[in-house]
Amino acid sequence: MARNSSASSARLGVRREPAQAIDVTAAAWVVRIDRGLDESEQSSLEEWLAGDARRTGALARAQAAWVGADRAQVYRAAGELRESAAGKAWRFATPWASAAAVLIGLTMAYQAWQGYARTHLATAIGEIRQMPLADGSRVTLDTLSRVSVSYEPTTRLVRLESGEALFNVAKDPGRPFVVQAGDTRVRAVGTAFIVRRHADGAVEVTVTQGTVDVWRETSVPAAVVRLAAGNRMLATPQSISQPQPLSHAELDGAVAWETGIIDLNGRTLGDAAAEFNRYNHEAVVISDPQLAAQKVVGRFEAGNPTAFVAAAAAMLGGHVRTDGERLILEPGVSIQK
């Protein structure tokens, strides 16, 4: 019914109510609803909602802002607002009107935050999140990772500001999907690939499906490396490596973190400890450089460093000492080179 009313008004040339005016009225209604509506007010609210299809959404947004607000603080601010309006040509006629004025500001802030949250995604330590993007693509963020999304007429741009992300890209030949990681760019149309930013500035790219192009923005001329599924490459501030083919086991290990698993795949103990420390507040410390250089194998839960150090100690003949939130792995016997 509301849709028909709006459509009829448009056909007759009647000027539509501005969206901002709808938000203002919605904010006022939310404050009145919180105070309690009598039968007459309830009828007025229903009549107002029926007058324009946009009003239901505006009321829902205002209610979301109101739920997250400290009501006592809103009413206190409203009182101060009414007092400051005294003696001026304009003033708020009722307490709920001034409270609604405060809520309008909260609603606008809430809407701005929602827009920001849809385009700026992040994970905390030990957190792995999978999120849909507006174009139908999907991003899975590894621990301590952050991305921002910007859709332009000819490009879908995602900035990987830190950490690691797996991108499952929806096909759109007219708007290539580009991941920016420092001065490295990765371009795809429809595919799946992983981009990881290392602490030393290097960017690692692994393709699980399809093909991507990789280049460094600062290279003149830009040397583009085409990377097909089942391959990995590393871009450093100095150069881009040639594609490195991966075995099925290596490719499986590259995406194991998506399910909360760390695949060590012959890494050194020092590298393995650094990897576990990305996911946990409890830090793994290798006390001896010679011990840290030893190779380890196995798959472990990313959130269980205790199981990892226990297994590593058993494999390498070491022992574990606990010091607060540190799990210190020490050599128990002489380590053979």
Image: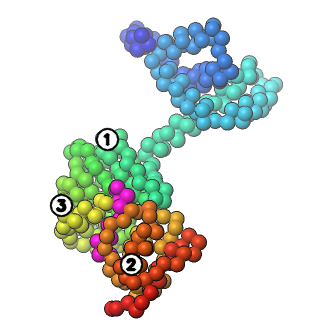
**Residue type, mark 1 in image:** Asp
- Please rate how many residues cluster around mark 3, counting C-alpha atoms within 10 Å: few if below 14, some from 14 to 19, many from 20: many
Between residue 321 and residue 44, name the one nearer to us: 321
**Amino acid type of disc 3?**
Ala
Residue ID at (44%, 43%): 118
- Dot 1 or dot 3: first in sequence order is 1
Q: Name the residue rendered at 45%, 55% in the picture.
A: 127
Q: Which residue is mark 2?
A: 314
Query: Neighbour class for label 1 at 10 Å: few (<14), some, many (≥20)?
Result: few
Q: Is residue 264 magenta?
A: yes
Dot 3 corresponds to which residue? 228
For badge 2, the amino acid type reads Ala
Q: Whole-percent x and y of residue 64?
A: 55, 31
User: Earlier along the polypeptide chain: callout 2 or callout 3?
Assistant: 3
Reply above or below: 109 against 181: above
Image-quadrant location for residue 267:
bottom left
| Residue 93, position as x, y percentages in the image | 74, 18
